[in-house]
Amino acid sequence: MTHVLALIDLSPSGEISNTAPGLLAAAAALGTPVAVTVTAPGVGSVLGGQLGALGAEIVFAAESEQLGSVLIAPQIEALAAAVAAYPSSAILVSNTSDGRDIAGRLAVRLNAGLVIDAVAVRQADDSSILATHSVFGGAYIVESTVTGGLAVVTVRPGAIDDRATPATATVATATISVDAARFAAIDSIADTAVESSRPELRDASIIVSGGRGLGSKENFVLVEQLADALGAAVGASRAAVDAGYIAQTAQVGQTGITVSPNLYIALGISGAIQHRAGMQTAKTIVAINKDADAPIFDVADFGIVGDVFKVVPQLIDAINARAK
């Protein structure tokens, strides 16, 4: 089997991103999964056990003293070095803003094909890589492929919920350096502590989102109450964000965050195509809206035509009663 590289995102404190299991599962379905990490010197080798438990058979730990001082360059250099060490059929990267930038630059550097925002990947009979995409607000499912040569694929976070078989990973370390003059420099980093008991929106398995149908910022608390009852993250449509009900960081959609949770509950959201583009790949969609003709019902697995201010409090009571 050919090697398939997966760039594993790490937090500033060195914690493995929630996107790692899905990327490694996708890599394992295509070949021998190789986890590529970029850390400060002396740190990379300690991640072998954790990444092996997620399915990585090989961990390529690239160590750089420039990490945190040059934007995305160490990750590009690490992947290029990993390809040279482990000839590969594909490179998988999370479809984040940084991930797309890394993927595009790497594809040019390696003269590889580039596939963006895949929700699934598989191997065709001729051993080429086929990527599945959800496009036009989820109205169509299409496939793309790279005809010959290396494929660089960005994978939508949360879209792949399979898990690879745990392995005892072989760890290889390498020291990398980059020409800082060719990349944007990071002058300083300011850590902002966000204290919340709720899951992070991008990686949450359950999301409760509210739209303009909530009517006001004060009424939007209903979304938060249901989310807390379910242990869910809070999202919103662009209309709710523009109306000032919640911060822009909660926006789900084409111009916000793309999510693929196990359960997505839409409260008072009409379901414009821009919103559906960001949540269409959720495993189960539940919509509550008083307008029976709202487009959100076209994609919902379960729909309730009713007043959110009557339905949701009853739902919260039922959830709380069941939890006792």
Image (spheres, grey):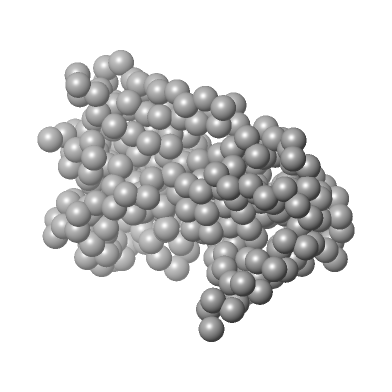
Q: Nearer the viewer, residue 186 or 45?
A: 45
Horizontal and vertical percent for residue 85? 18, 40
Q: Nearer the viewer, residue 128 or 119?
A: 119
Query: Residue at 63% of width from left, 58% of height from top?
Result: 208
Q: Nearer the viewer, residue 167 or 76?
A: 167
Q: Is residue 25 visible?
A: yes
Q: Is residue 169 above or below residue 291?
A: below
User: Would residue 211 appear left or right of 125 to someone viewing this image?
Assistant: right
User: Would residue 71 appear left or right of 128 to someone viewing this image?
Assistant: right
**Residue 230, image quadrant:** bottom right
Horizontal and vertical percent for residue 268? 75, 50
Q: Is residue 150 above or below residue 307?
A: above
Horizontal and vertical percent for residue 176? 32, 48
User: Would residue 301 appear left or right of 116 to someone viewing this image?
Assistant: right
User: Would residue 210 appear left or right of 194 to someone viewing this image?
Assistant: right
Query: Residue at 33% of width from left, 34% of height from top?
Result: 121
Horizontal and vertical percent for residue 313? 72, 68
Query: Residue at 41% of width from left, 52% of height from top?
Result: 19
Q: Nearer the viewer, residue 165 or 12?
A: 165
> Which residue appears farthest toward the top when viewing the image?
147
Q: Is residue 25 above or below residue 106?
A: below
Query: Residue at 65% of width from left, 39% of height from top?
Result: 297
The mark tally for this picture is 0
> Which residue appears farthest toward the bottom when viewing the image?
324
Q: Is residue 104 visible?
A: no
Q: Quadrant of the N terminus?
A: top left
